[in-house]
Amino acid sequence: MQSYRRIFWSFIFATFNLHIGALTIIPPFIGWIVVYSGLLTLGIKAREQALARQRITCVCLIVLSALNGFLMLINASGLFRMLLPILVMVGELVFFHFLFSAIVEHFKTIEYFELATIYAKKDRTYLVLKGLATLFMTVSLSLNHQLLGLGGAILTLIALIHVLTALYWLNKGAEQLLRRRQQALTFRS
Amino acid sequence: MDVNKRIFRIFLIIIGIVATGCMIFIQYVSLAEPIFFKQYADLSVNLDDDDYQYGLSDELFSFNYFTNAEDKRVVSYVSFPEYPDLHIQPFEDDWGMFGLDFETEQPDLIGQLYGRYSLREVLWQIVDLPEESLDNELILNEAIFYFSDGSEVKTDIGQIRLSRSASDSEIIEFLSGSSSSDGDSRSNFKVLKPINFSGFEAHFLDQISQRVEMKINNQNIYDLEELQLEEGDTLTIVSQIKPAQTLQERYTRFNLSLKLIFTDEKDQEYYLTWKESPSFREDFSFTDLYKYTKEQEGL
């Protein structure tokens, strides 16, 4: 459960950046590196393929966010510079879908089907929220459309809160639920 | 999970299609070089004032242009091929158009954004102009704008006429004036001796007559042939901006400069120069700016 806590906090650092002038205190790619370290110690019981793809996506996010930060620092312009934030958003969508899928697979493997169903629903909600947010932001960034940008930002924020709540619940709530189940099983036996 | 996989794939495909479409659209509408709006202005330089180089006697003058939204260049120098001795210092900043009332939506972008385009304003002042250059009127039709990245754009700027400011005859005294944000203005003068209005001279009359309705004492100036004024009468000049019929008209800036001619009973001529710079508060939109670029290509 420590790993979920690490992913929870590092994802917050990867998303919200503190700046002092032009200097970013914790650049997003550092946050993603810590997320990656959290993934390595997650202890999810899932197929190797399911684990590998979330790690690969996380590495992609590290590279993309580092590149995005660098291009921002040198004040670069051009199509690729415009495309990068969209690629980062798509990367986040893919990463959290893979993470939720692996968690669902994990709960199925250890026969906690109720939790598997809950996290499958959470994955679905996230896909819709983040998918729509990415679409809105793609059009907004390309055409400088303010209204779509506002819609995209609100949806991104809701998707972010949704992911953080899901991770927090894995960290705290799932632990309690698993403990209660364990006690119930012991009591029955 | 099959449902989730399906939603995931659908979103990835839609995002891919939309992003590709947006990139193609951006390439299609992007400008090869900035487009400057044409303007017709009659400006006077006050040479009596020693520090004329700090500005024109008219209000601080500006050029307006639009370029791609991500274009981070700014105009750093302007030269005029017709008058190489005329040196102008341009000032371009990210205040947005016409002062401080607009702000850029994205902090790393300059100017006022309209979709893929950014509307900019370049203020300028004369820093060097040999005094003898103004013995005749300077007529500027072309300018070369040098950008901060070293690139340059040579463009038709319409027509800007620079001349010495001349003092008016003291037969008419200015009383009051007002102007509104939509470009309408009203000026009142007091007539100091009996005179007859006998006509007017104006440059760019073709441009002005299409866009501005002007009245002297409630009579249309274009039809007015004679107007008798007695001592103590009030002379009222009213200008009203008419809606533009075409995009070329709409985005062409001009200032009004009329030389009103009066005669007294001895047929002595007197002049009153009346100037007005209508506010350039047109409704800009991305689609109109794009249509304007297409019209410019067609010209």
Image: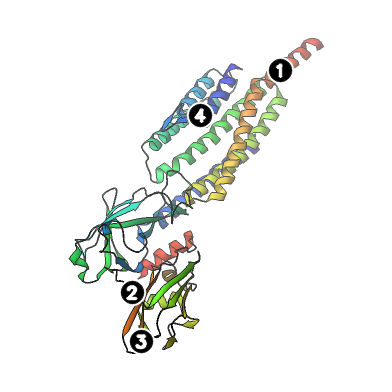
Instruction: Name the subunit of mark 3.
Output: B
Q: Quadrant of the N terminus of chain B?
A: top right
Residue A176: assigned label: 1
Q: CA distance from mark 3 to mark 4?
A: 81 Å
**Callout 4–callout 1 Cβ contact below 8 Å:** no
Q: Position of residue B221 (x, y in %)?
A: 43, 82
Instruction: Name the subunit of mark 2.
Output: B
- Reading the image, the residue beneath label 3 is B264
Q: Residue at x 60, y 20 (%)?
A: A45
Q: CA distance from mark 2 to mark 4?
A: 69 Å
Q: Are marks 4 and 1 on the same chain?
A: yes
Q: Is residue B33 visible?
A: no
Q: How many marks?
A: 4
Is disc 4 surrounded by few (<14), some (14 to 19) or many (20+) residues within 10 Å? many
Looking at the rendered structure, the kind of residue marked 3 is Asp
Q: CA distance from mark 3 to mark 2?
A: 15 Å
Looking at the rendered structure, the kind of residue marked 1 is Gln
- Reading the image, the residue beneath label 4 is A14
Q: Position of residue B119 (x, y in %)?
A: 42, 56
Looking at the rendered structure, the kind of residue marked 4 is Ala
Q: Is residue A167 visible?
A: yes
Residue B172: assigned label: none
Mark positioned earlier in the residue sequence (4 or 1): 4
Q: Helix or strand or loop: what does disc 4 sit on?
A: helix
Looking at the rendered structure, the kind of residue marked 2 is Asp
- Reading the image, the residue beneath label 2 is B168
Instruction: Name the subunit of mark 4.
Output: A
Q: CA distance from mark 2 to mark 1?
A: 91 Å
Q: Are marks 2 and 1 on the same chain?
A: no
**Callout 1–callout 3 Cβ contact below 8 Å:** no
